[in-house]
């Protein structure tokens, strides 16, 4: 019975009052707010630290201004680098509120700042010291690299950072395979580790100030601990504990398969409908890469289901998985859940394989939720899982619209959407699908005057 | 998240004010930000090891003209040396240099300050051994050594000691 209910809607079981799964955890926005205040406090503190380490006479001395700018940009740059690491450290409390794609968006948007500031730091310090020593720039560079402790390795670190920054430029990143880019990106941890020592040995706010040295070291050690714990320790512990194994691979439509995994203690996984995991299938060719795929149904212990469309090498290989293959997971992640809802009801929109997140989100909604669901596909057979969705919608007294055809044939715009969903202003919009589709719906919602807080999206072009 | 910017800003103001308050607030400040720096760029007097305590002269050539056998001292010229500047005070008894101290040391940044603080005691003992400005200097601190020797020479000149 439980096996059928993971491949078919659980609503068939007729549970009148579906409760949250025992493991499901409600996001607590207060924690994210506290994190923001703390992040701001750190920024204010390092700025003040750089300023108080300087006196007026030092500023007026030859090279004083450049040296001051150098230490200010260095401190703020290193602090922002710390925040960038924290943004991707997968702290569950923050992930649940802001969602992983939200955090990654901030990371992508802000990451150029620490890199630029640290490059500016190196330039300012070189110029400032050269002015103070009345030496040439080339000579000063040589002196800094050879005579100053830890500056050489910090410079190597800066070089790595700059290289990663260049590789991360959109135009270049797009040409790289996701795995290649990810591996290159990991070297950022090395770069930061190399840069650490020279801060304590040379920083005007740190030399001879044990208290700032301790606070700074503790902050970095804690960050490293969080990264180790949540990016490495927790996934390993969960994978070992739940011991997931591929149970069956079944075709769902053209190029789409569902993978049903079995595992232990799945009721203890804190999953909310609409969330995803990074999946690592432990075969000889796939073990080294982890890919994000959404759960297409809530877990029915001992089973768990994900549905994947073959769009790349990895997702194509998923279709060839054999039963018995062991699976490691990182997650669950994502804020695309019922907890994000701001208004009384919801409109769920999905295109193509985006239906997977919609399917488990829908399953997690109460029976009286009356959701409106829009499924979008070019051909009828592209609407995978449509039967399951239809049944889940029926049990929740909702309405299902299937929009089949090209973008010109099945138009979603300011006129057609309000006609399909007259009570749009009472509903949150959840949209999931390819990046272009998600963007178009988010823009449409904005044009229709729906506040951004009520629009939730998950693009699967991760 | 709504009003993310405001939370960030509130935190930033609090953090900034907190550190400033800590810095200017009484006894706790020196622990965090070090002793107040007189004079200018990372300047700190190097402790003198003279048995009679730091003998400092205010004028270019003070306490001159005393009888032979009486201690006299003078402060040498302020010599810039690339990473900063320093001057040296010399105390002599007859033709013997009995004490050397550095009343002024300014450097561009903390590292040079640290280095100078390590080197100056070595130079001092070289001078006390040689009883002149003719010293070998400390390798790895050539500029500092030269400036030190130069300032001592100018102090000795003021005391008319060859």
Image (cartoon, grey):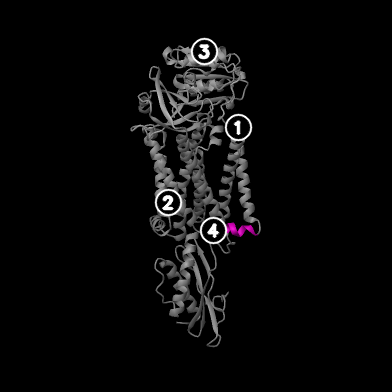
Disc 1 target residue: B2
| Image quarter of residue A209 | bottom right
Label the magenta part by its dominant secondary structure: helix
The residues colored magenta run: B27-33
The numbered mark, 4 or 3, whose residue comes first in the sequence reads: 4
Q: CA distance from mark 1 to mark 3?
A: 32 Å
For disc 3, the neighbor class at 10 Å (few under 14, some 14 to 19, many from 20) is some
Residue B5 shows in this picture: no
Residue A31 in percent (x, y) is at 60, 37
Tell me what residue is drawn at x 49 percent, y 41 percent. A229
Q: Which residue position holds label 4? A: A58
Q: Which residue is mark 2?
A: A154
Binning the other alpha carbons within 10 Å of mark 1 as few (below 14), some (14 to 19) or many (20 upward) gives few
Q: Earlier in the sequence, mark 3 or mark 2?
A: 2
Residue A380 in the image: above or below residue B114? above
Looking at the image, the residue that sits furthest to the front is A1
Measured in 3D between alpha carbons, the distance from the residue under mark 1 to the one under mark 4, in whole angstroms, is: 42 Å
Q: Chain of mark 1?
A: B
- Under circle 2, the secondary element is helix
């Amino acid at each position: 019975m439980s096996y059928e209910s993971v491949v078919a809607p659980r609503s068939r079981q007729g549970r009148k009052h579906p409760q949250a799964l025992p493991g499901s955890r409600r996001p607590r926005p207060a924690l994210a707010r506290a994190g923001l205040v703390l992040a701001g406090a750190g920024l204010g503190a390092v700025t003040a630290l750089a300023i108080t380490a300087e006196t007026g006479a030092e500023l007026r001395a030859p090279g004083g201004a450049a040296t001051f700018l150098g230490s200010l940009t260095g401190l703020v740059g290193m602090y922002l680098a710390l925040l960038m690491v924290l943004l991707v450290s997968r702290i569950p409390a923050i992930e649940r509120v802001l969602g992983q794609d939200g955090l990654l968006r901030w990371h992508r948007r802000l990451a150029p700042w620490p890199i630029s500031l640290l490059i500016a730091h190196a330039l300012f310090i070189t110029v400032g010291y050269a002015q103070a020593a009345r030496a040439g720039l080339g000579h000063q560079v040589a002196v800094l690299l050879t005579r100053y402790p830890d500056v050489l390795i910090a410079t190597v670190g800066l070089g790595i950072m700059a290289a990663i920054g260049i590789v991360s430029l959109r135009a270049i990143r797009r040409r790289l395979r996701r795995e290649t880019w990810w591996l290159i990106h990991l070297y950022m941890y090395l770069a930061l580790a190399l840069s650490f020592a020279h801060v304590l040995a040379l920083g005007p706010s740190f030399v001879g100030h044990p208290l700032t040295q301790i606070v700074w070291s503790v902050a970095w050690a804690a960050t490293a601990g969080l990264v180790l714990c949540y990016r490495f320790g927790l996934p390993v512990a969960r994978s070992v504990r739940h011991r997931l194994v591929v149970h069956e691979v079944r075709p769902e439509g053209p190029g789409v398969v569902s993978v049903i995994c079995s595992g232990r203690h799945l009721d203890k996984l804190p999953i909310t409908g609409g969330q995803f995991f990074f999946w690592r299938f432990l075969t000889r060719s796939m073990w080294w890469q982890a890919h994000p795929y959404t759960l297409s149904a809530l877990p029915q212990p001992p089973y768990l289901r994900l549905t994947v469309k073959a769009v790349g090498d990895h997702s194509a290989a998923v279709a060839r998985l054999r039963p018995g293959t062991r699976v490691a997971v990182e997650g669950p992640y994502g804020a695309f859940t019922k907890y994000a809802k701001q208004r009384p009801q919801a409109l769920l929109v999905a295109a193509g394989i985006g239906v997977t997140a919609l399917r488990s989100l829908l399953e997690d909604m109460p029976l009286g939720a009356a959701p409106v669901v829009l499924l979008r596909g070019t051909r009828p057979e592209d609407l995978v899982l449509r039967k399951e969705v239809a049944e889940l919608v029926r049990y929740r007294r909702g309405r299902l619209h299937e929009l089949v055809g090209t973008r010109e044939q099945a138009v979603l715009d300011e006129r057609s959407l309000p006609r399909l969903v007259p009570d749009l202003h009472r509903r949150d919009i959840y949209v999931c699908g390819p990046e272009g589709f998600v963007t178009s719906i988010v823009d449409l919602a904005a044009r229709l005057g729906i506040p951004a807080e009520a629009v939730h999206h998950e693009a699967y072009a991760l | 998240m709504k009003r993310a910017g405001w939370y960030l800003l509130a935190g930033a103001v609090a953090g900034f004010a907190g550190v400033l308050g800590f810095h200017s607030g009484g006894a706790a400040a020196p622990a965090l930000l070090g002793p107040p720096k007189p004079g200018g760029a990372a300047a700190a007097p190097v402790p003198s090891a003279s048995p009679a305590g730091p003998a400092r002269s205010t004028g270019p050539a003070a306490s001159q003209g005393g009888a032979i056998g009486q201690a006299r001292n003078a402060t040498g010229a302020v010599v810039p040396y690339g990473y900063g500047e320093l001057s040296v005070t010399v105390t002599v008894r007859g033709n013997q240099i009995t004490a050397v101290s550095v009343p002024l040391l300014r450097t561009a940044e903390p590292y040079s300050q640290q280095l100078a603080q390590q080197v100056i005691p070595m130079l001092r003992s070289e001078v006390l051994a040689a009883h002149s400005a003719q010293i070998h200097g400390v390798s790895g601190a050539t500029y500092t050594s030269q400036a030190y020797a130069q300032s001592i020479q100018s102090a000795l000149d003021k005391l008319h000691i060859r």
